[in-house]
Image (tube, rainbow, N blue to C red):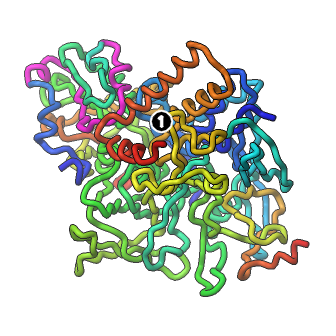
Amino acid sequence: MLRISEHPILTFKHGQQVAFRYDGQELVGYEGETIAAALHAAGVKVLRKSTVLHRPRGFFCAIGTCSSCLMKVNGEPNVRVCVEKLKAGMVIETQQGKGDLREDV
Amino acid sequence: MFDVCIIGGGPAGLKAAIAAGSQGLSVVLMDDADHLGGQLVKQTHMFFGSEQQRAGARGVNIAKELVEQVTSLVNVEVVLCTTALGLYDDLVLTYETEGSYRKLSAKKFIVATGASERMLTFPGNDLPGVYGAGAVQTLMNVYGVKPGNRVLMVGAGNIGLIVSYQLLQAGVEVIAIVEGGPSIGGYLVHASKVRRAGVPILTSHTIKEAVGVNCVEGAIVCELDSQWQPKSGTEQRIDADVICLAVGLSPLTDILWQAECEMVFVPELGGNVAYRDSNMCTSKPHIYVAGDVAGVEEASSAMVEGELAGLCAAKSLGVSGAHLTLQITSARSQLEELRSGPVGDKIRAGLLQAHR
Amino acid sequence: MLKKTGVATPEELANVLPSEGRLNRGAVAVLECFQNIPCNPCATSCPRHAIQEFVDINDIPSFDGDLCNGCAICVANCPGLAIFVIDETYSPDETLVKLPYEFTPLPASGDVVVAVSRAGDEIGHARVVRVQNPPVFDRTAVVHVAVPKALGHEIRFIKAGGPSRA
């Protein structure tokens, strides 16, 4: 269980618990936390595959500067899930390759 | 038109906004996150320095204080979820906010964009589970999620030592800290805290490879000789699900390059930085720098540099008076004091090279 | 060597250990601070000025054991958690050590915990006598533990509630 329940210095204020979909599965997380944090807490560390060699990738910097964590969110490709906040009912999908921007038009 | 636009709402940007705002100027403070505070919001440990830099207070609490001060200034406008895009000689800044592309103009700009995590090259370094130290802090201290259960920390500078301690506080095991250099780079008191909590510090050791199929399952570490070359036969496998890299930061200088400030490569400051004078002003008279973007250092100096930049920007706009002069002198002497000891040798050497 | 290991050597410790005479008179602070870093909350927090005001904040603290009464305010204020209070007069066979502690669960008075050395080695057991955790200490609790006299200069950490939990 990766969620911290007791901490000597910090008290965590979470938003509402909300359901969201990840590659067809229903998961729960807290509204307002990043999608990457919610996925990580649910045991999902592999966020995509690299475009040429299909190597598993997770996040690295967690502040939106390295592009390791790109996923498709509500149909929109190339979303940096380490900074994007979770909302109820979000549909998160593993992106295949570079993502097709035409889908967004 | 604003008097001062500050790009970056971390410790340096916050102090710059408070300084310029307190002089009665119209200030806009922007940050690309949805909250102010930058790296401060993740710092659960007590800060060093002197009372003027809030020594003894925890970073998270200093962040709250600074945010309160900034938001209480009516002449300071705060814009969040806003990314600065381009800064131009005609005093225009283009930026993106909520999906729309906008422009603003200001007489002076203070770039306080901070720095980002460096990567280390080794086979397997792209596996999920290889995380920057800042990422681990964000996950743990902001969202309350452990990065894993068994961590190998790479780097015994202040960040590696502090994040190791924070991992222990979050209930995560830190198997070891490996440091490529022959000695511990961070404050020895931080090292002592993790040593007595049972974490070994292996100097002259590095990570050779990360192993795992879909995620990190382990790491191969080895000893280095005095030429920083791996010593054969010293490989050890460590079982871990997180490899945390605390191998340095690199200033986030993109906008300074784009704005055509004169830049210089200074290894002691973390990489490419803008040339600046003692007012924190770059080669462009409308652009100032403060904090880690000006040179990777500590939060305490970032706060004072931010204050200095804000005050000097105000002075350049015609604000005057004995009080302002006193504050500027005080900021300069605080910076000198923070940097005058042996742990400041590297910074002082770096700053000489970046001085206009 | 401290710079390589993070653990102070006996020689380094000998420089900061109060004299036997002072230790025999009651509780006194031991400032295990060996590096010139910019930092001075120990001096600004000491109500008795036993830690002198810094001329240069990069100096190692200047400590006068005769002015110290072992109150442990400095223990909670040192950002490096490098100060400990030792009371060798606690009882005929025990020394009382006050150490900073920032982990959960916090031990409680009466608990028996594992005594840990500077190098992280388990060296015996300690009896928790008192836990100071007032709001003014801002979550750096000061735990008072009684240990056999031989461990008084060795114990610098405790493990509460189980072997591998820090």
Q: Chain of mark 1?
A: B
Secondary structure found at label 1: helix
Residue found at the far right of this picture:
A105
Q: Which residues are magenta?
A: C20-48
Q: Nearer the viewer, residue B256 or B58?
A: B256
Q: Nearer the viewer, residue C17 or C3?
A: C3
Q: Which residue appears at 66% of the width and 56% of the height?
A: B258
The verdict on residue B331 being magenta is no
Horizontal arrangement in the rendering, residue A64 relative to residue C37 (left or right): right
- Point out residue B187 in the picture as x, y percentages from the top left corner: 33, 44
- Point out residue C158 in the picture as x, y percentages from the top left corner: 31, 43
> Eyeballing the image, is C148 above or below B329?
below
Q: Which residue appears at 54% of the width and 19% of the height?
A: B325
Quadrant assignment for the N terminus of chain B: top right
The quadrant in which residue C129 appears is top left
- Point out residue B95 in the picture as x, y percentages from the top left corner: 78, 51
Q: Which residue is mark 1?
A: B300
Horizontal arrangement in the rendering, residue C47 relative to residue A12 (left or right): left
Horizontal arrangement in the rendering, residue B186 relative to residue B166 (left or right): left
Label 1 Cα neighbours within 10 Å, binned few <14 / some 14-19 / many ≥20: many
Q: Nearer the viewer, residue B113 or B237?
A: B113
> Eyeballing the image, is C57 above or below B212?
above
